[in-house]
Amino acid sequence: MGSRILVVGAGAVGGYFGARMASAGHDVTFLVRERRQQQLRSEGLCLISSAGNATISPQMVMANGIDGPYDIILLSVKAYSLTAAMNDFAPAVGPLTRIVPLLNGMQHLDILADRFGPAAIMGGTCFIVSRLDAQGRIVQTGTLPRLSVGEQAGGDTPAARTIAQTLSGPGFETVFSTHILQDMWDKWVLLAALGSLCCLMRGTVGEVASQPAGRAFAQAVIHECASIAVAAGYPLRDAALKGTVSLLTKTDSTLTSSMFRDLQQGAPVEAGQIIGDLVKRARAFQVPTPLLDLTDLNLRVYEQQSE
């Protein structure tokens, strides 16, 4: 018997990885709300992807239809939807269930552990550029997506290896990581710096970098974020730091953060989880972060206006 996988969220991220795993023959069910269920019933789950297009007829369940525990829960929701998602998938969590969250930041690890116990929660992170189009199709662009998973405590366990093998399929790379918390910090620094850059300056990486003080500003923001990671005991590896600086100082880059794209559309943003929580940790470590503080203030005002 293969592992039963419940993918929470059939959106741009969970829908992509879940559809690829289902195509590989894994037992994948998507936890969906009624509107998305109707859409997927009539259209199928459709991927338009640089790694090859695909359409599947997904197995789906709604929260009130969960009939017992799943082996693996792949959790892919926006951080501000975490509480609602936990209430929805709680009936799918049994004593041996492992939850693999692909959320941004680190706060969700504690929230999930408080609800389901620390032993159930693995570390996870992913890199993917994808969005839902107007028809509900998942459009993935750019490099081959990557999903990393590992035990929070680090190290190599047979259970974690099995989960990494299960969470695999064509169209993305699966990484079994023995230092997943470091991977998550590396990504958090990148996202927080990118989010600060785009949201404060209201532009793409290239539009900022091509201005006289733009690259210096980008490096200053990265330095602030990285200094918090150092204080927390997760200093960025050299390659990760160099990669982040290189990515955020390219003068011809059209890259923007998802937080900035949400902000432009007047949608909710993951401000508290990506920026606010980082600022809170900076205060606890007494690390000065004037630029992050400014981003935090900027986004708090935006959220107040959106209420």
Image: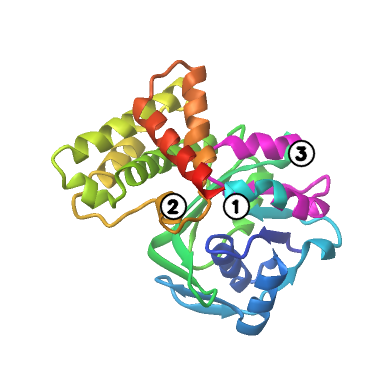
* Residue at figure coordinates x 53%, y 63% from the top left: 12
Q: Secondary structure at mark 2?
A: helix
Residue that lies at the very extreme toward the bottom in this rendered image: 42
In the displayed structure, would residue 155 be above or below residue 101? Answer: above
* Residue at figure coordinates x 31%, y 49% from the top left: 202
Q: Secondary structure at mark 3?
A: helix
Q: Nearer the viewer, residue 298 or 52?
A: 298
Q: Secondary structure at mark 1?
A: helix
The image position of residue 227, as x and y in percent, is 38, 24
Q: Is residue 105 left or right of residue 29?
A: left
The image position of residue 156, as x and y in percent, is 60, 39
- The residue that label 2 is drawn on is 263
Disc number at residue 115?
A: 3
- The residue that label 1 is drawn on is 164
Using the numbered discs, state the Cα–Cα distance from disc 1 to disc 2 in whole angstroms: 34 Å
In the displayed structure, would residue 210 be above or below residue 289? Answer: below
In the displayed structure, would residue 186 be above or below residue 280? Answer: below
Q: Nearer the viewer, residue 279 or 55?
A: 279
Name the kind of residue labelled 3 in the image. Answer: Arg
Q: Earlier in the sequence, mark 1 or mark 3?
A: 3
Q: Which residues are magenta?
A: 85-114
**Location of residue 223 by image quarter:** top left
Residue that lies at the very extreme toward the left in this rendered image: 212
- Label 1 close to label 2 by CB (< 8 Å): no
The image position of residue 284, as x and y in percent, is 52, 18
Using the numbered discs, state the Cα–Cα distance from disc 1 to disc 3 in whole angstroms: 24 Å
Q: Is residue 3 left or right of residue 124?
A: right
Is 175 one of the magenta-colored residues?
no
The image position of residue 77, as x and y in percent, is 60, 54
Q: Is residue 113 left or right of residue 21?
A: right
